[in-house]
Amino acid sequence: MSSVTRQISQEPVYERGIRVNLSQFLQHGLQLFFIGLVIGMERNVLPLISHEFGVPKGSFLFLMSFVVSFGVVKGILNFVAGHLSERIGRKKVLLLGWLAALPIPFLIYFGQNWYWVVVANMFLGVNQGLAWTMAVTSNVDLSKASQRGFATGFNEFAGYVAVGLGGLFTGYAAAMFGPRAALFWFALLVILVAGLAGTFFLRDTLPWARAEHREMQSGEIIGHMPRYPVGLPAESRARDVFLFVSFRHATFGAFCQAGVVNKVADALLWVMLPIYLNEHGLDAVQIGWISAVYGLVWGIFQLFTGVLSDHIGRRNMIVGGQWVLAAGVLMVRFCDSMAGWLAVAVLMGIGMALVYANLIAAVADISRPRWRSLALGTYRFWRDIGYALGGIVLGLVAQLGNRLEPAFWLTAGLLFLSGLVVALLADETHPRLNPALL
């Protein structure tokens, strides 16, 4: 055998597909579970103890400031992560995210006022922007185009089941050991275990994305060719990708605005729903169950909605999900019992499950492999800026009215309009249902 032949035969083969890459696919899913636990711990306890950090009753805008700081930082880091990962690889960016998470439990435990929590959530935004973005991107890299709905559904299943469990666990732990101690030890343990698991067990998936690009360039891709947008070549600068996905392409733009509004709704459910339920007589454990049901249904149903979108398409599921979520947000106001709020939590979880992973899959469907990470980073930038916009707008609306109810009405209206925008402006993106015209 010649040296040239031997060299070629020894080149690594980066075959895409969940089955052939199952170990790494599950490892990245485990990372998403850890990431979800960290953000889940804030979904219940932290808003309820805001008075311990000096937040006056009724200061809704000040209360929402920790979500604003999280959203701004996470949004920016989503895009930075995509750009950086094309240079140094997915794994290194993910591990930087866990390094950035280390100050969070200390800032919350030793915090003297609410500004400490705001700073802690800036670090949380860095963690989520780097680690979550890379874990999602990595599993998309490993999957075939026909599996993208399942892959993103599995990703978000792993993350948001953990969000629900994190809120439930810390609710019980806070009742037993005190809120700050529960958050401190829970967060510190998760961060350390996740960082060590990522260091020793993850492989970088950037070579899979580059192999897919080479296959596409050589015409070796089998199956339906995705409808990649005209006007943005495979080799494009980060700035051009950002502007194109944000403003210059109707389908991408429709998905970006849907992501923004979706996170406005999640900001409401993260901060204002626990306060609202507490005002109506529920304690931390009961609120923890409602938050857990919302997160668990959101996570579990994405296993099914992701697969379903691989068969029937993404767009209509996104539209329907925004409208189901709008109905759930409205119905919060008409419940007055634990059973009623649990039922509404199920409805809102289903709405989120219809939308969340399918937006990511839809963006990935029509993004060229060479700038897919940048496109996903752009979408996730706008989506998580929704936390900041939601924190400011909903905080102002609640504070001006001196009550929480107007924030629920506004959010429901925005969700309905957002679904209408997707229905009118976005094309179906699944390559089998709307393939490129060759």
Image (cartoon, rainbow, N blue to C red):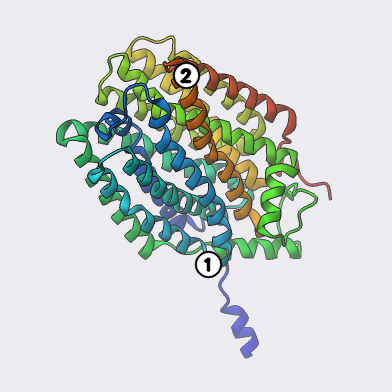
**Rendered view: 220 above or below 413:** below
Q: Are marks 1 and 2 in contact (CB under 8 Å)?
A: no
- Tag in front: 1 or 2: 2
Give me the C-alpha separation between circle 1 and circle 2: 47 Å
Percent of width and height locating residue 141: 57, 56
Q: Depth check: 165 or 114 in front? A: 114
Which residue position holds label 2? 400
| 29 sits to left or right of 37 | right
Q: Depth check: 215 or 360 in front? A: 360
Which residue position holds label 1? 88
User: Helix, strand, or loop for circle 1?
Assistant: helix
Percent of width and height locating residue 152: 53, 44
User: Helix, strand, or loop for circle 2?
Assistant: helix
Report the residue that reaches farthest toward the left: 176
Residue type indicated by callout 1? Ile
Residue at image coords 62%, 80%: 8
Q: Depth check: 55 or 225 in front? A: 55
| 142 sits to left or right of 4 | left
- Hey, which quadrant is residue 346 in on the image? top left
Residue at image coords 69%, 28%: 421
Residue at image coords 48%, 50%: 129
Q: Residues within 10 Å of mark 1 (few under 14, many from 20)?
A: few
